[in-house]
Image (cartoon, coloured by chain):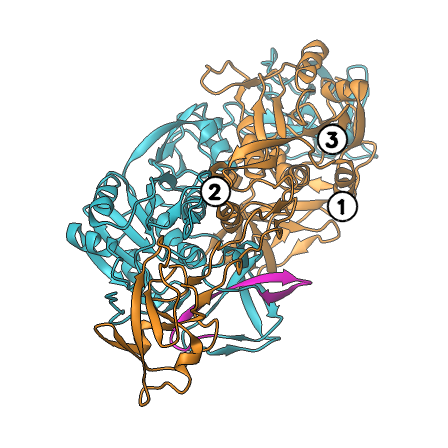
Chain colours: A cyan, B orange
Amino acid sequence: MKTRPFQHTIALDDARAIIERTVQPIARTERLPLGEARDRVLAGTIVATADVPPFSRAAMDGYALRADDTAGAGRATPRTLHCVEEIFTGQMPQRTLAAGECAAVATGAPMPAGADAVVMVEETTADGTRISVLANVQPRQNVGAQGADIRQGQTVLAEGACLNASRIGAVAALGMTSIDVYARPRVAILSTGNEIVEPGQPLAPGQLYDINRYTLAAVVEEHGGIAVPQRTAADTIDELSHAVEACLGEDVLVFSGGSSVGERDLILDVLAAKGEVLFHGIAVKPGKPTAFGCIGTTLVFGMPGYPTSCLSNAYILLAPALRQLARLPARLSRTVPMRLGARVASVAGRHQFYSVRIVDGTAMPAFKASGDITSMSQADGYIEIPADTEVVEAGSMVDVTMF
Amino acid sequence: MKTRPFQHTIALDDARAIIERTVQPIARTERLPLGEARDRVLAGTIVATADVPPFSRAAMDGYALRADDTAGAGRATPRTLHCVEEIFTGQMPQRTLAAGECAAVATGAPMPAGADAVVMVEETTADGTRISVLANVQPRQNVGAQGADIRQGQTVLAEGACLNASRIGAVAALGMTSIDVYARPRVAILSTGNEIVEPGQPLAPGQLYDINRYTLAAVVEEHGGIAVPQRTAADTIDELSHAVEACLGEDVLVFSGGSSVGERDLILDVLAAKGEVLFHGIAVKPGKPTAFGCIGTTLVFGMPGYPTSCLSNAYILLAPALRQLARLPARLSRTVPMRLGARVASVAGRHQFYSVRIVDGTAMPAFKASGDITSMSQADGYIEIPADTEVVEAGSMVDVTMF
C-alpha cells in the first residue's frame, strides 16, 4: 500500500485566513414573500414610500384636546371640556376641535384636527359629555405623530440587513408583501468511500452507514445554506471525477473521506486536476487531513471521513465560511465560561477541538475517539485548546461553545 | 367612550409563573425523514440495534500487526515483519495474521483476524513486503474496536433529546432513515382592529398595515412553532367570536390588538366567555395590556396592538412558553454584558424592555415609542430593567439580549 504522509500541516488560523480571503459573498438574489424572509439577508435598501404611521394618532386611551386648554389643570383644579365626538381606531374624525372641546379617543385612533395632545383617561372624570381634566398636558403629549416611526423617503433597512422579526415588521409597515434577499448558498455533500452505505440499505461485512451526509447537511442548514446531498461515490478516479463534476453547478462542494494519506485517497487528485488545492492538512485534532480549494467558482472542502473529525471541522471551518458566503453575520457567540471538570491533555502543536458535556455547571470531557459519533451526540458543546497548550487542568475556566 | 382602566397589573415574574404552570408540553408526534429532523425533539428512546462500528477497524493508515511482535522496537532497533495483504476500506481481510506478519491497512479498514494493533505508517519503512517497524505498539493501539462507539442494546439518544447535527449523525450510524419527533406546536396568529389592513391592499384614511402578523410569525417559527396566520378580524363581538372559534383547533392562539382598556376591546370578553382569563395586565413597559388564558386546550395570548409592545412581549412571554410547549430547551443565553452608552430612565413599578443598538461595543438606547417598529428594527437587542430600578446610569454594565 502506497501511502502519502503529510509533508506539513498549516496552523488553524492560517487555514481560516485562506478560506476567508477565498470566499466571495453570494451575488444571486431572489424575491420572497415577506412571511418567508426570516433569517434571510436583504438584497437592496428599503426606502419608505409613505409615512408610518400615515396619520397622527392617540398613543393612549383618553381625550384628544388642545394642550392650551389644560394650563393649570390638576386634581384640585380640574379644567372642564366638552366632548364633541368619539373616535375609534379605523375611523376618521368628523370634527375640528375648537377651544374648550375634546374628543374621546382610543389608543391608535386618528387625532382630530385642532387637537395637539391626549390626556389619559385615568387623569379625567366624565359626567356625560362634560369631561373634567385633572392634569396639565403638553403639546404632542400621548400623540404618535404622522411619520414619527418612519418618514417617507427614509431608509428603513440597509442592504445586507439580516431579517429578524422587527425588520420584517418594518417592511410590513410599508405594506410590502415581498422582498429581495440574497440566495442561500447551495452546498453539495458528497460522501466517498467503498465502505460507505446509505442508511436504509443492508450492511455488507466491512461496510458502515453514512453519517457525514447527515451531520454536514445539518450544519449547512443551520448556517444559511441549502444542503444538496449526492449519491455516495466509490474510490475510483472515474467515479470520483464524475461525482465532482456533477457538483460544479453548486456554490460549495463538501466531500468527506478520501482526504487522508492512503493510496486510495484519490479525490484530492481529482480536486488538484480540475482546480486548485489551497491547503491540505491542518494542525488541528481531530481533523488534520482536511483540504480546501476551488474548482472554478465552486469552493471545495475536503473533510476527513471520520464522523467527529468531519463534524468538528464543519463547525470550525465550514460554518464560518458558509456565513460569509451567505452574507450572514458571524454567529453570535454561544460561548459560556465554565469550569473544566477533569484534566485534559492535548497534543502539542495541534489546535484541539474537545467535546464536553455539561454536568452540574461543569464542563466534563466527552471526547472518545475521532471515529465516535456518540462522543459528540452525548456532548453539549466543545472547548478549543490552542496548539501551544498541552494540558488544561481540572478546575480551569474554559469557554464552552454550545452546539 | 366607556373605558375600563386596569384594576391592577401583576408582576412579570408572576405572569411567567402562571404561563409556565399552564403550558403542557406537546404530546403529538410525527415521523420524519432523518434529513428533516434538525432542531426537532426526539419522541422516544433510540436503542442501538447493532454495534457501531460493526467491525474492528484501523484508526490510522499503517500496518495491522500483533502488538507482541513490536516488543522492543524503536528507530534504532526496528522489528521486521512480512506484509501479507493490503486491506482497503470496504474490503474484508482474506488472511489471519500469524506471528511475524502484518497487513497494510487504510484508516477505517477492517482489522484482520490475529491482529490486535496498528502501527502508523510514519513509524515504519518498507522494502517491498519487508516492513520495518520503528516503534513499540500496545495491544488495541490505533484500533477502533467493534462497538466502541455504540454497543448493540445501548441507549443512543434519550426521549426528549433535541436533534442537533451530532445526534442526527448518531441515528444515521444505526442505518435508520426516519425518526419519531414531537410535532411542532401550531400557533394561530390573529390581528384584530378595524384599522388593520393586510399588506398589499391600499390604505384608507385612518388605516395601518398589519405588522404584528409578521413579527409574531417570525418569533413563532424561531422558537419551534408553526405560524398559522388568520384573516384580520374587525372589532365586533360576532366577527371576533368567529375568528377565535376558527383558531380553537390550534395549540395556541396569539391575538393582537383589543386587549387594552377601550370600550371596543371586545376580544377579552370573547376569551372570558369561551374560556378562562388567567391574567390581564402586566407591570411591564411596553406591553402592559397583555392577557393570557385558555379556551379548552388552546392557550391564548392577547398581545397589545402596538407593534413593539406586541413584539417585546412575544420575546419575553410567548417565546419561552412556545419552547416549553415544543419541549425545546430554554433558549441559550444570547446575552452579552456591555456598557450602557447613555442614561436610561425607567418607570418605577414596571419591568422595562428597552431596545438598544450596539455602537463600538457600547449599548446605545434605541427605544423611540411603543408604536414604533423602527426602534426595534434598528436595534440589535434589548436590555431589561427590573421594576424596582428607576434609572440606569450611562457607563453601567448591562446584559444585552441579542435579537
Residue depicted at 42% across the width and 74% down the height: B66
Residue closest to the far bottom? B76
Q: Amino acid at mark 3?
A: Ala
Residue A23, position in %: x, y?
28, 51
Q: Nearer the viewer, residue A19 or A140?
A: A19
Q: Quadrant of residue B325?
A: top right
Residue depicted at 61% across the width and 30% down the height: B306
Q: Secondary structure at mark 1?
A: helix
Span colored in magenta: A346-365
Q: Is residue A299 left or right of residue B289?
A: left
Q: Nearer the viewer, residue A169 or A396?
A: A396
Q: Is-magenta flag for residue A367?
A: no
| CA gap, disc 1 and disc 3 | 14 Å
| CA gap, disc 2 and disc 1 | 28 Å
Per the image, the residue denoted by label 3 is: B291
Chain that bears disc 1: B
Q: Is residue B112 above or below residue B246?
A: below
- Tell me whether marks 2 and 1 sit on the same chain: yes
Chain that bears disc 3: B
Q: Is residue A66 left or right of residue A241?
A: right
Q: Quadrant of residue A199?
A: top left
Per the image, the residue denoted by label 1 is: B13
Per the image, the residue denoted by label 2 is: B378
